[in-house]
Amino acid sequence: MAKGTVAKDLFGKPVRQLRPRYEAALERGEKKTLPERAARVRWLSGVIPRDRMFVMSVETSLVFEEAKASFVYRNFVAVIVLAAAFIEHWFLASLEARGYHKEASQGLAAAINCARRNNLVDSIILDKADRLRLIRNPFVHFERI
């Protein structure tokens, strides 16, 4: 059926098209969670600086945007994994730019240790990044029970 045309029955009367149940359920869910999502967007706008330009790769930028969207939509495991990935991208790029090529190739734990040893980043930030790394690990590394 062409766009803009209305389906008709055998007598030429318009046929009311019912939306699929899943579509109505999605709309109800969107309406129900709108205030919570709006509150998370407001919180993000208060903690992410708008007055600074950050230079980052396309991949790092996409990881950052995906982490924000996951937070808004309450996908908190994804937020943990993506936030850790963003921090890893940022740390490794910073180490590479400063000539720490070996440490930048060894992952987030090595990057945090290198930054700590060389006083490249405030220890409070490093402690938080390491804590996030430890929270992330069970989600991304299989551990036998």
Image: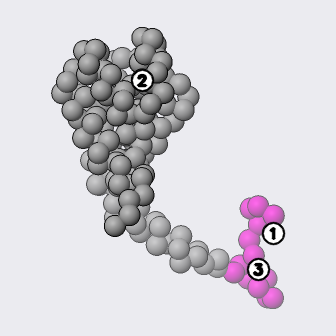
Q: Verify whether residue 92 appears in magenta.
A: no
Is residue 44 rendered to the left or right of residue 94? left
Percent x, y of residue 105: 48, 27
Quarter of the rendering containing residue 95: top left
Location of mark 1 (residue): 1
Percent x, y of residue 10: 81, 88
The disc at residue 88 is none
Q: Earlier in the sequence, mark 2 or mark 1?
A: 1
The amino acid type of the residue labelled 1 equals Met
- The residue depicted at 25 percent of the width and 15 percent of the height is 119
Quarter of the rendering containing residue 108: top left
Location of mark 3 (residue): 8
Location of mark 2 (residue): 103
- The residue depicted at 58 percent of the width and 74 percent of the height is 19
Q: Verify whether residue 5 appears in magenta.
A: yes
Percent x, y of residue 70: 41, 49
Magenta part mainly helix, strand or loop? loop
- The residue depicted at 47 percent of the width and 67 percent of the height is 26
